[in-house]
Image (cartoon, helix red, strand yellow):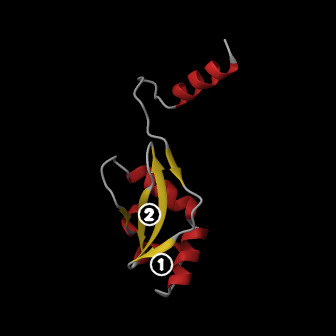
Amino acid sequence: MKVENFLVSFYELMRTDLLGESRMEIVFTDIDPCMDGFDVALQVKIDGPPFSCKITAEALQNLSEVASNNSVDLINAAKQNRYYIEDAFRRKYDGNEHPFVLNSVDFA
């Protein structure tokens, strides 16, 4: 078996669960978070073009104990808590919502 064929087979195996059903490949881009209205937005790709994953200012304030609505503080809080944001997104995403918004309850 050629290495390329092995890698393709391995990749497809990793994209399926034990029942053989395809799983979504969720990848957050390297683009820095930015303000989108009162929310902070990150870019995520799921087997296609990127779209926004938003997190509310309230959720960021609760997650990071940031006291202000200052955009610089909120963006920094999103950068510092990116792991938790990505984890919450993966748990909540159901394949249908564009744009997608995370609220405080998603981190409880």
Q: Position of residue 49 (x, y in %)?
A: 44, 50
Dot 2 falls on a residue whose secondary structure is helix
Within 10 Å of disc 1 (Cα), the crowding (few <14, some 14-19, many 20+) is some
Above or below residue 12? Residue 107 is below
Give the CA distance from mark 1 to mark 2: 11 Å
Within 10 Å of disc 2 (Cα), the crowding (few <14, some 14-19, many 20+) is some
Is residue 108 in sight in this rendering?
no
The disc at residue 82 is: none
Q: Quadrant of the N terminus?
A: top right
Residue drawn at 55 percent across, 56 percent down: 29
Residue drawn at 39 percent across, 27 percent down: 21
Residue drawn at 50 percent across, 73 percent down: 34
In front of the other: 22 or 2? 2
Q: Amino acid at mark 2?
A: Phe
Above or below residue 60? Residue 7 is above
Dot 1 falls on a residue whose secondary structure is helix
Q: Position of residue 77 (x, y in %)?
A: 56, 74
The disc at residue 107 is: 2
Q: Quadrant of the C terminus?
A: bottom left
Above or below residue 25? Residue 105 is below
Q: Earlier in the sequence, mark 1 or mark 2?
A: 1
Looking at the image, the residue that sits furthest to the left is 96
Tell me: 30 left or right of 40: right
In front of the other: 50 or 104? 50
Q: Amino acid at mark 1?
A: Gln
Q: Circle 1 sits on which residue?
A: 61
Residue drawn at 34 percent across, 46 percent down: 95
Above or below residue 25? Residue 86 is below
